[in-house]
Amino acid sequence: MYIKKITVISAITVAIAATAIGGGHSPIEQRQAAMKAVGGQMRTLGGMAQGKVAYDDFAAISALEIMRDAAMTARPLFPSGTEMGFETRAKPEIWAEGSEFDAIMGQLIANLDAAIAAEPADLASYRPLFGAVAGTCKACHEKYRAPEN
Ligand code: HEC
């Protein structure tokens, strides 16, 4: 009973978050907006990893949290039936038999959770955590995102 309630509440929260971030109506527009929100944090996170921006643990952890929420919003926005539409860069392989798409999205969220939980106090401890996060972006895009045209 209790667990059921939590599931319902979190489903509603995800739906609300998707609407808030998405703005658009179709899942394609909503997931693109959510992925944009994921990407939006790369400036801060990547900049710090590359030493272009001074490392600030509060800013890093906040950005990781925003990215995790956006990734969790994006995750259910790839329902089957949304593989068509010229405006999407999502490849049909996402919905194919044996697809690792959801597993990689889960890995991104797990890597973000781990980075947040570690509360990296300095650049040296932050870098490998960020590396694991960025590795999942690349792994998924290479396989499941079409190039820009
Ligand atoms: C599990 C797969 C997956 C992971 C992990 C992933 N992405 Fe994506 N991303 C996609 C797909 C698929 C699209 C294209 C969505 C569409 O066009 O419908 C996309 C689109 C994007 C876009 C373009 C959004 C737009 O339409 O303007 C950005 C920016 C982006 N991703 C950044 C990131 C970053 C940064 C990470 C890692 C922190 C990441 N993504 C992780 C699959 C993934």
Image (cartoon, rainbow, N blue to C red):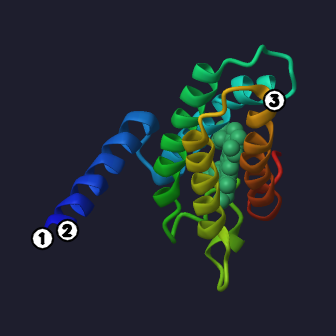
The residue wearing badge 1 is 1
Q: Please indicate whether residue 110 sits to the left or right of residue 129 in the image.
A: left
Q: Tell me if I can see residue 8 in this picture.
A: yes
Q: Say above or below: 1 vs 34.
A: below
Residue type at numbered disc 1: Met
Q: Nearer the viewer, mark 3 or mark 2?
A: 3
Q: Which residue is identified by label 2?
A: 4
Q: Is residue 23 left or right of residue 133?
A: left
- Residue at the spot 78% in from the left edge and 30% down from the top edge: 46
Q: Earlier in the sequence, mark 3 or mark 2?
A: 2
**Label 2 neighbourhood size at 10 Å, few (<14), some (14-19), many (20+)?**
few
| Front residue of this view, candidates 46 and 117 | 117
Q: Is residue 118 left or right of residue 93?
A: left
Q: Earlier in the sequence, mark 3 or mark 1?
A: 1
Task: Please name the residue that numbered disc 3 is placed on.
Answer: 49
Q: Is residue 31 above or below residue 44?
A: below
Which residue corresponds to the image point at 61% horizontal and 64% vertical from the top-left? 84
Q: Report the amino acid beneath label 3.
A: Ala
Q: Are marks 2 and 1 in contact (CB under 8 Å)?
A: yes
Circle 3 crowding by C-alpha within 10 Å: few under 14, some 14–19, many from 20:
many
Is the shortest distance between ligand 1 and the CB of mark 2 under 8 Å?
no
Three-letter code, disc 2: Lys
Q: Quadrant of residue 20?
A: top left
Task: Say whether residue 86 is visible.
Answer: no
Q: Quadrant of residue 115?
A: top right
Residue drawn 66% across and 64% down? 104
Q: Position of residue 142 (x, y in %)?
A: 83, 59
**Residue that lies at the very extreme toward the left in this rendered image:** 1
Q: Which mark is residue 45?
A: none
- Image quarter of residue 54: top right
Calculate the distance from the C-alpha at mark 3 to the C-alpha at mark 1: 44 Å
